[in-house]
Amino acid sequence: MIKMVALDLDGTLLTSDKTISKGNEQALKKIHDAGVKVVLCTGRPINAIWRFIEQLGLTEDTDYTITFNGALVVHNNDKAELAKSGIEKADLIPLHNFVKAEHAPLDILDFQQVYPMTDLKPSMYQQQFKGNINFVPRAFFDLSTTDEYSKAIVSDKPELLDLYQSAIDDSLRSHYHIVRSQPQIMEFLAAGMDKVVGLKALLTHFGLDFSNLMAFGDAENDLGMIRNAKVGVVMENGQEPVKQAGDVITGNNDEDGVAQYVHKYFD
């Protein structure tokens, strides 16, 4: 039985103008009121998506959010951490060397703020980012060696990201889980880190497993949860490899695709 519904945001739950439609809102509130756990799964921190959490009414004692693509599971009510897994500065050195050689930008995130690397090409990430988080420019040399970091971002024009991506070799891939979450954003997570990691911790917390999960997604960083969920639902606008991995294709993100399948399944 499906007892938890996990939802990616960009390209999935959110429309192209970065809002939750009334149709999606009503459908998700209905199943949430019926006892189904509705969990937002995002690469962003919880403060950056708080308006969506409030819009959907996900502020009860049993409501949680998967943030930083699985690296942090947060209790919505009090922002307490249920599960957390970071990456150390030393683990980011191969990536810094790579982007420097490619003349690419880099942003490094801890669990509170974003550090655009001032010793590299200026990044596009801040202008892409919509939400409440501080950007604190800093040189890589000056990053703390004792703090934990959630992930790193390379954000540039899509055609330049294509070039950077084509230059990644097996050695670099062995250090990170690399996902192209948007045409202009490539994310570097700790090896093995995925939204599935956070979802597994949350499912276990509630005494559930992946047979109780339905997941909605559209992009490469959603592949893990789409493959592992009992019902993996992919948006019509989703990337082709994600569609191939899913169980169901629903409507696109600008036509209440989430609500379409929620009504079909739960009604």
Image (cartoon, helix red, strand yellow):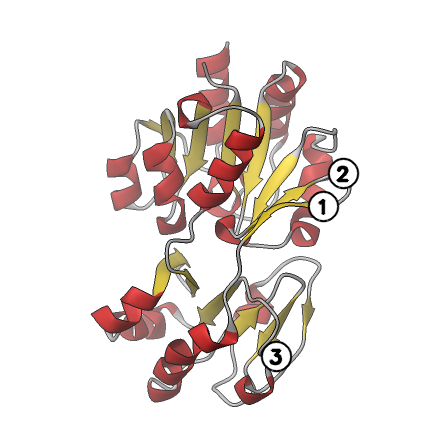
Real-space CA distance between mark 2 and mark 1, rounded to the nearest whole angstrom: 8 Å
Q: Residues within 10 Å of mark 1 (few under 14, many from 20)?
A: few
Real-space CA distance between mark 3 and mark 1, rounded to the nearest whole angstrom: 23 Å
Camera-nearest residue between 85 and 59: 85
Amino acid marked by disc 1: Ala
Q: Which is in the foreground here, disc 2 or disc 1?
A: 1
Which quadrant, please, contains the N terminus?
top left
Q: Position of 150 compared to 136: left or right?
A: left
Q: Is residue 169 visible?
A: no
- Element marked by disc 1: loop
Which residue is painted at 44% across and 32% down in the image? 215
Amino acid marked by disc 2: Asn
Q: Position of residue 131 (x, y in %)?
A: 67, 57
Disc 2 designates what residue? 77
Which residue is painted at 66% across and 50% down in the image? 46
Q: Position of 26 compared to 223: left or right?
A: right
Amino acid marked by disc 3: Ser
Q: With respect to residue 15, does 165 lie above or below?
A: below
Q: Position of residue 267 (x, y in %)?
A: 50, 9
Q: Position of residue 253 (x, y in %)?
A: 47, 38
User: Quadrant of the rendered structure where residue 156 is?
Assistant: bottom left
Which residue is painted at 58% across and 54% down in the image? 44
Disc 3 designates what residue? 144
Q: Residues within 10 Å of mark 2 (few under 14, many from 20)?
A: few
Q: Residues within 10 Å of mark 3 (few under 14, many from 20)?
A: few
Q: With respect to residue 258, does 175 lie above or below?
A: below
Camera-nearest residue between 6 and 262: 6
- Element marked by disc 3: loop
Q: Which is in the foreground here, disc 2 or disc 3?
A: 3
Disc 1 designates what residue? 80
Q: Are marks 2 and 1 in contact (CB under 8 Å)?
A: yes
